[in-house]
Amino acid sequence: MSVPVRKFDAVIVGAGGAGLRAALQLSEAGLKTAVLSKVFPTRSHTVAAQGGVSASLGNSEPDHWHWHMYDTVKGSDWLGDQDAIEFMCREAPNVVVELEHFGMPFDRNADGSIYQRPFGGHMSNFGEKPVRRACAAADRTGHAMLHALYQRNVRANTQFFVEWMALDLVRDEQGNVQGVVAMEMETSEVYVFQAKATLFATGGAGRIFASSTNAFINTGDGLGMAARAGIPLEDMEFWQFHPTGVAGAGVLITEGVRGEGGILRNSAGERFMERYAPNAKDLASRDVVSRAMVTEINEGRGCGPNKDHVLLDITHLDPEVIKSKLPGIREISIKFANVDPIKAPIPVVPTCHYQMGGIPTNYKGEVIVDEKPVTGFYAAGEVACASVHGANRLGTNSLLDLLVFGKSSGNSMIDFIKTAPKDLPVLAMADVERSLARVERLNQQSNGTQVNDARAAMQATMQKHCGVFRFKDMLAEGVAKILEVEKMVKTIEIADKSKTFNTARLEALELENLIEVAKATMISADARTESRGAHVRDDAEDTPERPNGRDDANWLKHTLWHRDGNQLKYKPVTMKPLSVDTIALKTRSY
Amino acid sequence: MTTRTVKFSIYRFDPEKDAKPYMKDYTVELDSTDRKLLDALVKLKVVDDAISFRRSCREGVCGSDAMNINGKNGLACVTDIDTLKQPIQIRPLPGLPVVRDLIVDMTQFFKQYHSIKPYVINDTPAPDRERLQSPEDREELNGLYECILCACCSTSCPSFWWNPDKFVGPAGLLAAYRFIADTRDTATNERLDNLEDPYRLFRCHSIMNCVDVCPKELNPTKAIGKIKDLMVKRIA
């Protein structure tokens, strides 16, 4: 079968923060770069980030990248790789200042410097007390950042392919990556984008869960494509449940609300976080706060007629502060919770928010399999696992991740492209044909499963069996159930066969990606018989040798799920930073 | 869970099989948790998977699901179903070519946005740290930078309908003023030159449809007025 081929130096899949930051490096270096995105770039999910991007600028009080590094390692429950974490925290001030130079409309202090607010888990002097490290543009930091990055790419003449969906990765017989197969959404035409270097910056996959802060587009496309191409997925059992999603709606309420002084209260009006985290209180790490909230609800201290949520209270704040620093939150509360937070507290509940795991990379953005880079393949942002977030990500470290690793992967790609042969190699057709067959199967399928039925079954299974608290029996049952759902996905069918902007077909192709993520998550979670960060299970007991159920003797290691046979392998955590001493293991408390 | 029945009339057009567009009636059962128009459209798509529309964040910040709702442009994800008169009439944004159903071709809209050079221009060497900006100067950007490029405004503007290739439109002009107003931008004169034309700026006749429909409650007309003031001052 013949497929049109378009040739580039680099192809980037995804135009959120990481993809745009990488594209800027490549465009400014004069390389022929294609950026593919399912949506117009400013509609990417980075747009929904609210609270801030962390950097130890120290604009309001003393701060240091080493403290930031310590907090990130501790936040990760020691599962983060310390070389990557050092790299990220040291680079943070540079990339944030650079972003300001690109035109990012940060809020300002009286002296004209970038405004910074406190955020969960970010402390001064190696865990002493909360520090102002989150650089913010009101509570619309992601929106401001995504637009600034897009605008800078307009200036750099980056070539965008808007509303193109990448379908599959193309590897040759040696496993080298040659590009992607992609579909133009408006026409359903399929092309190969061949390039010397390919970057996945496709974001997260929160849509595997029924309740998520994530956009509809967050369907784990990069993860699905990587898994089908034989790339393992790392640490997929670790999903962050954000403490404050609007109850019932799932829409995010930034931790910046607590950074500005917001307080979580139970049905008795009690500030319950004082019991769970006496030092950091409401600004403890996200996994800690989410578990505290679920515990309150499970013990009957939830609010509302069904006692199924808690309240986020900012009624004690100056209304002017709410209007100037949290205008977007006020808008969301009024629209989605029918509550003006100046007058009444916001009903909130922990909601799936972020995947800590992803495609295994190093801090240069190179994809690493069997301790070696996969030639021509890079990943950055939420789809990647560098691993800087380990078992639990700190708020504001995701926007930082996009900037630091978007840039570093762009630089790695430039170095690689400069040394690669001038002419592209002969295109290997096996993966291309596999991809075409996937589309063709969908066009031909009849008497199969409805896309919505299979997706709903997956989301309900993930929500019930793999949530904030996990249970041994439920996980085992969850594995069996999700493998049943996989069978459903194999026969999904669509009624709409039109070639013109067929969103039914796109949703079906997305579901084929989501199911890979769901399997990776459930199977990895079932196997990890300890509690660490966001992964907490009932059979991992809190003992002196295993504080909080964390079992460093057996589980201080990264999971690698392989699609082929659902095999699990493991690799060690990098405990050695680049220049400073290892941040030694200790019991995590806030 | 309490349910209710809601009636819709939706614009349908698939160029592959339809000679011309038509309105199709739908009735959908909604749960009490289905509050927004987008919730209903997602439910409808389960029944008829051919209904085509864009959507992403479902919280009014990505700008994907702009459409014409009972005659007024808005975002489906932040529009309450129960405030709408039934049958709820849903059409694509007016004035742009329809690709299919509620999906319009936004090329012209983005072309105008790009035409105003939507990025900070400052050729002075950047300092090692951030460029300083006072909180007061930063405040000038409020009401400008929050635009989500949904196109509700430009596609409600008669001047844009008539001259989408010549008139920048409210969204593009709001962006133009966002950069003029930024103390870090040094290209005000160049930006005003770029708009000095019978159409690009001056086709705005202050009809204010843009203000009426903006889902982010921004005021493009005010921003356009400020650009016009700067033009006049420059001549004086």
Image: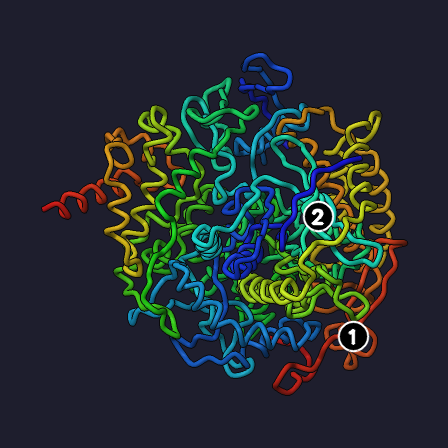
Q: Residue furthest bottom?
A: A581
Quarter of the image where one finds residue A244? bottom right
Quarter of the image where one finds residue A472? bottom right
Residue under the point 84% across and 25% down = A447
Image coordinates of residue B203 in percent, x first then y, are 26, 31
Residue under the point 48% across and 29% down = B67
* Residue A90 versus residue A322 in the image, above or below: below
* Residue A516 versus residue A187 in the image, above or below: below
Q: Chain of mark 2?
A: A
Left or right: A125 as drawn, with respect to B112: right
* Residue A583 versus residue B230 in the image, above or below: below
Q: How is the image coloured?
A: rainbow
Image coordinates of residue B51 in percent, x first then y, are 62, 25
- Of pointers 2 and 1, the one earlier in the residue sequence: 2
Q: Residue furthest left?
A: B236
**Residue nearer the viewer, A360 or B72:** A360
Left or right: A75 as drawn, with respect to A238: left
Q: Amino acid at mark 2?
A: Val
Tag 2 secondary structure:
strand
Task: Quarter of the image for the N terminus of chain A: give it.
Answer: top right
**Is residue A471 in sight in this rendering?**
no
Q: Chain of mark 1?
A: A
User: What label does residue A18 carry, if any?
Assistant: none
Assess disc 2: are there few (<14), some (14-19) or many (≥20) residues with their C-alpha within 10 Å of its C-alpha. many
Tag 1 secondary structure:
strand
Q: Which residue is mark 2?
A: A180
Residue under the point 23% across and 51% down = B189
Image coordinates of residue A496 in percent, x first then y, are 70, 24
Marks 2 and 1 share the same chain: yes
Tags 2 and 1 touching, CB below 8 Å: no
Q: Which residue is mark 1?
A: A572
